[in-house]
Amino acid sequence: MFNNLTSESDDRGQVGIGTLIVFIALVLVAAIAAGVLINTAGFLQSQAEQTGQESTDQVSNNIQLVTAEGEADQANGEYTLVNATIQLAPGSDAVAISDSSGNAIIDVNVFGSALALDTSALGNDDILTDGDRLNLEFTGALEAGNSAEVVITTADGSQTTFILTGPDPISSDDDGSIVRLA
C-alpha cells in the first residue's frame, strides 16, 4: 500500500505549505484589523466621555437669580443703580466669574435697555461656589414701563436668562427707594 507512491505525493507537501502560509497571512491581517478596531474604539470612547462631560457641565453648572433691584427716580421716570444678585443653582459645580487679570469670564448681555454690566465690580480670580452670592452692578438706567433681558453665559456654555421690568408709573412713595425689578 505504501509502495505505490507517485510523484503526485510530492506535490501534496507543497500544497500544505502554501495553505499554511495563507493561513498565517490571514491571522496577521486579522490581528492588524483587530488592533485598528481597538485603537478606534478607545479614541471614540475618550471623545464620547469628553463630550458627555461638556454637555453635563453646560446643563448642570447653572446660575440662578436671587433678586434684582433698582432705585426709583420719579423725576426722570427711570430706575438707576440697578443690581442683581445671583448664585449657583442647586447641584452646580463652581463657576469662574473672572480670570487673574480681572476680565469677566461670564458673559452678561443686556437686551432692550441702556443697562450694561459694570465689570469693575468683579474681583480677580473670582469663583462662584456653592452658597456664595455675587452682586452684579449695572450702569445706565431702566426706564419705567420698560424691560431688559439679561442673559448670563458661563464659560461652560450654560445660559441663564431673566427679565428686569421697571414698574410704571413710579409713585411719589417709591421715589428714591429701592424697588424690586425681577
Image (cartoon, rainbow, N blue to C red):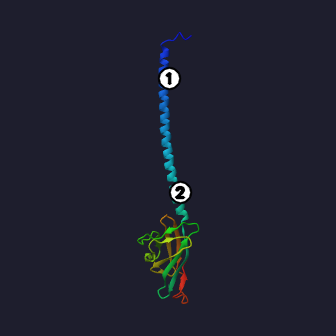
- Residue 141 % position (x, y): 46, 81
Q: Which residue is mark 1?
A: 16
- Residue 138 % position (x, y): 46, 78
C-alpha gap between disc 1 and disc 2: 53 Å
- Residue 61 % position (x, y): 54, 65
| Disc 1 secondary structure class | helix
Circle 2 residues within 10 Å: few <14, some 14–19, many ≥20: few
Disc ID at residue 52: 2
| Disc 2 secondary structure class | helix
Q: Can I make out residue 169 in this image?
A: no
Query: Which residue is drawn at the image coordinates 56% and 73% (left, top)?
Result: 131
Query: Which residue is drawn at the image coordinates 48% and 31% (left, top)?
Result: 24
Residue located farthest toward the left when viewing the structure as drawn: 101
Residue located farthest toward the bottom when viewing the structure as drawn: 172
Q: Disc 1 vs disc 2: which is toward the camera?
A: 1
Q: Amino acid at mark 2?
A: Gly
Name the N-terminal-most of marks 1 and 2. Answer: 1
Q: Quadrant of the C terminus?
A: bottom right
- Residue 111 % position (x, y): 47, 73
Closer-to-camera residue (44/68): 44
139 left or right, relative to 173: left
